Image: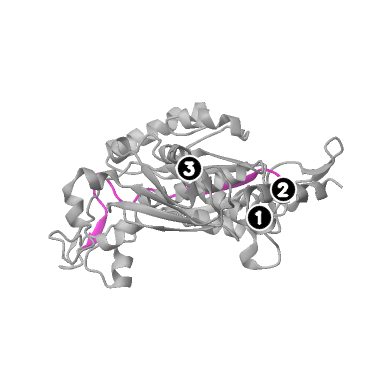
């Protein structure tokens, strides 16, 4: 069975829920492992006050017994602490019949507000924004924590770091190793390049001072990815296509590239590809360079997998200045304000790790199969052995 997941819940509702299907039986899981990644999602200079007081409390509802998966779907509930802290949301987000006294009718440009209202026939933007909110990514990160755990058993480790914040760019061209992840998470902007860190923080402070927001770019690197995930035979089986869709699905992401995708578009072919070499000592083929990002023909090569995601500035501003139209009066106004971050780029890296992990775990399950963790590991090792012959 291939790993898949489904999330449910709204930003200010009682809880988020995620169900993950396809995990093999016997995989060790404890709530603390999931909470660690959820805490990483709240990291980063420029986050709003919600991240400071909101601790994601999770409950393993099903699929796990005595710290190990059962092979059945794993269900996780993530409490929304703000719902418990304020009676406002009990009434505002109640599932019982009723109506709000304060409908939101000034849709934000760049958000799902207006098109969602038009698509579903809503008269209140909250019917849209509560689900469109990036708070939903907490449920994805919980699912991704399980995917990462599965991948570690076959030697795959995933990290992310910020390479651009607004116009401030990292200049370090070397790839961080997985052992650098702790240092990256200690950075206020989750940047591997210490020289660029100060410029990024300054850019955030400048935007905050003006009540504005900032976007940026993150890079995700997966080490130890097996050769042969994905396929060239169908459009929807290409690993880079699946990664692009998964990462592009993250709220506010407007661009995805694999390896040096956009840069190579301006180069000649002689400069754009990774030469193939034979490593006699380890009896394997290796690529010289990382331009392809660890994929060729829709299939993983075994080299580090590199995915970058570009996030636009957030659509909610602390000083609302974006022109919009009131959907009731049709008069020109400015968009409404919800509590917001100056930037969520540092958190984007953690969410992008999640989406990469979910794609890789699903494709590893497709290729190696196995109802139990031991069978999954054995099948992966057996395939690896064929490559050494």
| The N terminus sits in image quarter | bottom right
Between residues 177 and 98, which one lies in front from this camera angle? 98
Indicate which disc, 3 or 2, sits on the residue closer to the N terminus.
3
Separation of residues labelled 3 and 1 (CA atoms): 28 Å
Q: Position of residue 85 (x, y in %)?
A: 21, 43
Residue 187, placed above or below residue 100: above
Q: Do the residues labelled 2 and 1 touch (CB within 8 Å)?
A: yes
Q: Position of residue 13 (x, y in %)?
A: 28, 54
Q: Give the range drawn in magenta.
A: 301-325
Is 79 placed left or right of 144 in the picture? left
Q: Position of residue 296 (x, y in %)?
A: 71, 54
Q: Does the magenta stretch include residue 315?
A: yes
Q: Is mark 1 on a helix, strand or loop?
A: loop
Is 17 placed left or right of 26 in the picture? left
Q: Is residue 313 magenta?
A: yes
The residue indicated by pointer 1 is 370
Disc 3: CA contacts within 10 A as few (<14), some (14-19) or many (>=20)? many
The residue indicated by pointer 2 is 378
Residue 185, placed above or below residue 309: above
The residue indicated by pointer 3 is 350
Residue at 28% x, 43% y: name it: 81
Spot the residue most to the left.
101
Residue 335 in sight from this viewpoint: yes
């Amino acid at each position: 069975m291939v790993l898949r997941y489904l999330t449910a819940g709204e930003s200010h509702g009682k809880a988020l829920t995620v169900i993950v299907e396809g995990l093999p039986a016997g995989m060790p899981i404890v709530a603390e492992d999931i909470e660690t990644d959820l805490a990483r999602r709240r990291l980063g200079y420029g986050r709003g006050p919600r991240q400071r007081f909101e601790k994601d409390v999770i409950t393993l509802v099903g699929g796990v017994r005595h710290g190990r998966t059962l092979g059945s779907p794993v269900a996780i509930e993530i409490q929304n602490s703000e719902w418990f802290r304020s009676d406002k949301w009990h009434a505002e987000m109640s599932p019982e019949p009723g109506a709000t006294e304060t409908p939101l009718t000034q849709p934000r440009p760049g958000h799902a507000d207006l098109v969602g209202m038009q698509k579903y026939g809503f008269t209140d933007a909250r019917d849209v924004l509560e689900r469109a909110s990036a708070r939903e990514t907490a449920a994805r990160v919980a699912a991704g924590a399980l995917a990462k755990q599965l991948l570690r058993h076959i030697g795959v480790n995933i990290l992310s770091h910020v390479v651009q914040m607004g116009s401030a760019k990292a200049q370090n061209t070397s790839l961080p190793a997985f052992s650098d992840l702790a240092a990256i998470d200690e950075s206020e902007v989750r940047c591997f390049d210490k020289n660029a860190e100060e410029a990024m923080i300054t850019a955030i402070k400048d935007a905050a001072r003006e009540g504005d927001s900032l976007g940026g770019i993150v890079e995700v690197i997966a080490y130890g990815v097996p050769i042969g995930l994905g396929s060239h035979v169908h459009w929807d089986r290409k690993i880079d296509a699946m990664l692009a869709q998964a990462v592009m699905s993250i709220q506010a992401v407007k661009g995805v590239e694999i390896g040096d995708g956009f840069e190579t578009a301006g180069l000649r072919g002689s400069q754009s590809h990774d030469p193939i070499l034979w490593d006699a000592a380890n009896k394997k083929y290796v690529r010289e360079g990382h331009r392809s990002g660890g994929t060729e023909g829709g299939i993983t090569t075994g080299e580090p997998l590199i995915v970058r995601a570009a996030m636009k500035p957030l659509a909610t501003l602390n000083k609302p200045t974006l022109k919009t139209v009131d959907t009731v009066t049709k008069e020109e106004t400015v968009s409404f304000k919800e509590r917001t971050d100056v930037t969520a780029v540092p958190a984007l890296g953690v969410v992008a790790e999640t989406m990469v992990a979910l794609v890789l775990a699903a494709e590893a399950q497709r290729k190696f199969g196995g109802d139990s963790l031991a069978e999954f590991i054995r099948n992966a090792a057996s395939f690896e052995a064929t490559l050494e012959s």
